[in-house]
Image (cartoon, coloured by chain):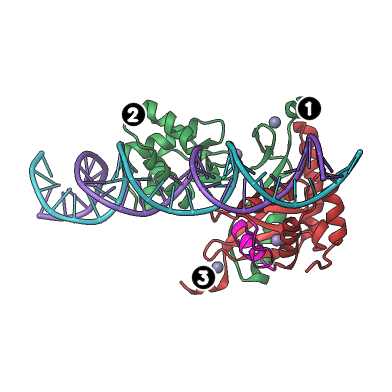
Chain colours: A green, B red, C cyan, D purple
Amino acid sequence: MKQEYGKGYQWCHRKIKGHGYRMTLGREAILDVLSQADEHLSAEDIYMRVHKIYPNIGLTSIYRTLDILDTIGLVNKFDFGHGRARYELAESSSGKNHHHHLVCTGCGHIVDYTDFIDEEVALLKKTEEGLSRKYKFTITNHLIQFYGVCESCSERK
Amino acid sequence: MKQEYGKGYQWCHRKIKGHGYRMTLGREAILDVLSQADEHLSAEDIYMRVHKIYPNIGLTSIYRTLDILDTIGLVNKFDFGHGRARYELAESSSGKNHHHHLVCTGCGHIVDYTDFIDEEVALLKKTEEGLSRKYKFTITNHLIQFYGVCESCSERK
DNA sequence: TATGTAAACGGTAATCATTATCATTTCATT
DNA sequence: AATGAAATGATAATGATTACCGTTTACATA
Ligand SMILES: [Mn+2]
Ligand SMILES: [Mn+2]
Ligand SMILES: [Zn+2]
Ligand SMILES: [Zn+2]
């Protein structure tokens, strides 16, 4: 159960406590489910998976915890336009590379891509600096998504 | 009322009819409100403004029309993370330049920026081609947003 | 190790933007 | 004017997320 992922369980634990939160069995289970997920899970997806290993969990706690984890940067929350938020472990905690998303508007399939990511990130950095200066914003985050139709969706006419 | 904007009312009219839809007073009023808007309006914002010049309009028609206009590319629909969708006239119909958004997570203020847009668009084009080939996607759209804290929000501690 | 207290919890009800339904009206075409 | 399709507005339904509240738990302290 308590497996290692990214910078590891201990690192997440410290980060949570460092922000004044407690580490509980429920939170541990949520991190565990996220670390094993290969897709971008909704709160209810997470609820169902956590429920198997920790049956007492309530959906409310899932939302509460995800909100905290998003706030302190351990998870990323996304809206891919399907009416519900989706979550993934952040790079820092998952050990995955920085990536952006390609979304099929037909079936909802999502591709994590890292192609051109270095160029993208370089331009983003430059843009952030420019915008920051010009508009007096402290920029904390960015979002890049491409939308289109995947192969099987376009074959399905 | 029926004023000129972007490629003009006639152009929008033709585009709507070209997709098999009818041009009605309500739709005209919605386009009119959008063309005069200086912000990114929610469905209810639009409803209230249209209601002044066309009191019989129902909120349902606002949603229906916006959905159609989004689908045929006359308006863009955005989610800036405040629980409701926001709309703006698309470049083609508004005459505005291609731009992306800078969002203040404190007060919700949104800046349209065009800085570095040529470089951004060039990279996007290249990335789109690469992703398209590699993942067999027909890419139709992209989304770029920066999130941060505006000056007055950071002064307000 | 026992205890006090704030944090976290689960269940339930409430919220609220968006959609579905459906009877009525309007439009384009003849 | 008659016809059928598209559009409309009022209303109800939906569904993800949040608010509330009484109970339980984690953990700093003694
Ligand atoms: Mn991802
Ligand atoms: Mn804009
Ligand atoms: Zn697809
Ligand atoms: Zn602000």
> Which quarter is ligand 1 in?
top right
Label 3, label 1: how far apart the Cα atoms are: 50 Å
Label 1, label 2: how far apart the Cα atoms are: 43 Å
Determine the chain carrying the residue at label 2.
A
Determine the chain carrying the residue at label 1.
A
The residue identified by callout 3 is B154
Kindly tell me whether residue A67 is visible in this rendering: yes
Disc number at residue A55? 2
Q: Residue at x 44, y 44 (%)?
A: A66
Disc number at residue B131? none
Label 2, label 3: how far apart the Cα atoms are: 42 Å
Which element is circle 3 on?
A: helix
Q: Nearer the viewer, mark 3 or mark 1?
A: 1
Vertical side of A98 occupied by B149: above or below: below
Determine the chain carrying the residue at label 3.
B
Q: Quadrant of residue B75?
A: bottom right
Asked if labels 3 and 2 touch by Cβ distance under 8 angstroms, the answer is: no
Q: Residue at x 57, y 68 (%)?
A: B150
Membership of A16 in magenta stretch: no
Vertical side of A12 occupied by A128: above or below: below
Task: Assign the N terminus of chain B to one quadrant of the image.
Answer: bottom right
The segment highlighted magenta reads B38-57
Label 1 amino acid? Lys
**Can you give x and y, in whole percent of width and height, for residue B31 in the image?**
75, 60
The residue identified by callout 1 is A157
Label whose residue precedes the other's in the sequence (1 or 2): 2
Which element is circle 1 on?
A: loop
Q: Categorize mark 1 by other alpha carbons within 10 Å: few (<14), some (14-19), many (20+).
A: few
